[in-house]
Amino acid sequence: MKIARARRLSQSFGLLLGFFGATGIGMTHLIFPGIHCYACPWAVTICPIGLAQNLIVFGTVPYFWLGMMAVYGVVAGRGFCGWFCPFGTLNDLLSFRKVKIQRMASYSKYVVLVGTLLAAWMFADTMFCKLCPVASIEASIPYLIMGVADVNTPFVIHMITLGITLVGMILISRFWCRYLCPMGALLSLFNRISLFRLKLDETRCSGCAACVSECPMGIEPHKQYDDHNCIKCGRCVDGCHLGALSLRFGLKDRS
Amino acid sequence: MNKTAHRAILLGALLIVIAASTAVAQAPILDFVFEADSVSVPAGGTSLASLRVTNISVQEADDIEIALLEGPVTLDAVEPIEVLAAFDDVRIGLPLHADEAANLGATEARFEVLYTYCIGDMCYQILEEIGVTIEVTAAVPASDDGESTAPAVVASSQTETEVWKIILPIALVVSLAGTLLVSHSRRRHWTLRLVAFVILGVSLGVGLAMNQDQQAQSIGAVLCTSCVGIEVTPHMEAALSADARARIATLDEPIELLVFSAPWCHACPYAKAMVEQAAEVAPALTVRIIDVDEDRAAADRYGIIQSGRTIVPAVLRVDTGEILFGIEDLEQRLLSLLEAS
């Protein structure tokens, strides 16, 4: 239970950083280590996916962006999805059905990532943002309330994508993180080398699969502990009565 | 890994950084491209040759001077460009004058460009030669000639980077990452982790040196309503209806409008054009365009910044303080803004 509590605390911190602009502080130079709309009236950090598209539109070689993504990737990989990302937290809150992941379908998030970058290049516009359900919650709705936006076609499109994503999240736990999130796709690329990682002590594992029923991503942690879909949330660690699984941070593989 | 290996890795990374910075220091830092392959100059007349100067380095270039070495034309004096920031670019209009007795036809003209740049205490003066084909054409009637006293610097815009410069680093990281996705070998993971650390360090260092964090900040700090899909990106041409023009023409009270825009905002040209058209029909209407990237203070003063975010495009009526955000149904909203007493 200790991990669950620490994770709630860390997710709260993610929410706090995400919406720190409520204090009146403006936009900082920080790139958010998750998906979080920079257009949100309370955002103080930059959405990595929104920024990447803008940089492509501007024709900037994205050194700073690449460096920051590598930092986040090397530090925790998809750990940010499980421990930090506010939209991940929303996914968590709606995780009712922990169904098994469709492995082939989980590669669709890479298609979303590549498609996002290609579309930005081809249309010279931030096409993904116009569909992004995170922007639906964090920009479309607040700006409608603030009187900056109206109920128009883009608003309706945002509400449709949000609706579909919410239904998906209710029917399949972490639906967005499993199949669609381009930031998750980006971070997952570093999952195997990140300092924060899930570790399996094979000598202790009996193969009982108690961890499988706990996993919100629908993977089999005792077989795929370094999988690109693992968000390192640690639910399997709490669920394993034999202590075969653990979360580690650092370069050394201590057992 | 033992300590020696760790030291060797650190030393290697350091050498890479040093080698990269040396390579950057020795490279030419300005790139010159004439926007047309040949420039046509009428005999006895003047034409502007548009030259794009791009700073392709992390250093700023200073005192860029351009002179004509040889060619069938003369170059009127061009103001030197004092500073061209890292990765910025500028378009220069070179006023080329052909003598009435000049031989007609195409000839190569050569220009000399002199500029300096400094890395720390070390300053370098660079002399480069560039050329363009000049085509002297038959004289045009004097009335068409006009005064060619156009400003030397035509416009500064976003850098146009070659596509491979964007694709290459992304492809590098993606291929690294792709290897990680399929690989289960621990030894390979160590190598890849090392590569990731090097990419991380070099990218971050170069990015920060180029002030890309500030660029990122300014992207985040300005909300372009059509960019995040709060509004439709305008593809229609901005045109006030005849009815709107007639109503605006009847305005006789002096009204000042400020249009807040950003150079990269898709909806801003539409908003600017609509307001400018209104100003054309109503002499009492004055319009000022404010670039929020350059004048954030004005945006702050007039309440265009909400929750720390500048929202563009925004049209503000100065005397009432009323603001229109975005371009949705702009004509109608503009009319009510102007007609409100």
Image (tube, rainbow, N blue to C red):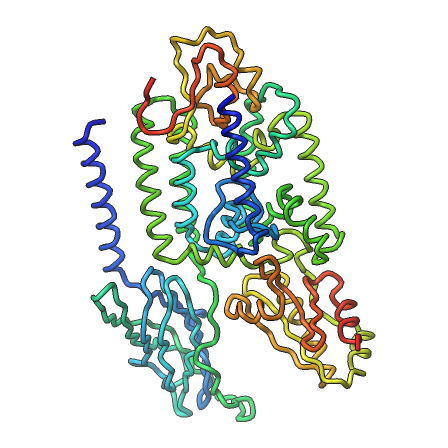
Left or right of residue B256: residue B206: left
Q: Is residue A22 in view?
A: yes
Residue drawn at (24%, 64%), measured in percent from left and top? B120
Q: Is residue A115 in view?
A: no
Residue drawn at (72%, 77%), measured in percent from left and top? B278
- Image quadrant where residue B337 sits: bottom right
User: Residue A90 at x, y = what percent?
Assistant: 62, 34
User: Residue B57 at x, y = what percent?
Assistant: 33, 60
Vertical relation: B63 (above or below) B183: below
Of B164 and B97, which appears nearest the observer? B164
User: Residue A222 at x, y = what percent?
Assistant: 47, 14
Where the C terminus of chain B falls, by quadrant?
Answer: bottom right
Residue drawn at (42%, 36%), measured in percent from left and top? A73
> For the image shown, how many numbered marks are present on the structure?
0
Left or right of residue B102: residue A101: right
Vertical relation: A51 (above or below) A107: below
User: Residue B23 at x, y = what percent?
Assistant: 24, 54
Of B232 and A9, which appears nearest the observer? A9
Vertical relation: A33 (above or below) B297: above
Residue drawn at (38%, 74%), measured in percent from left and top? B133
Vertical relation: B111 (above or below) B13: below
Left or right of residue B9: residue B203: right
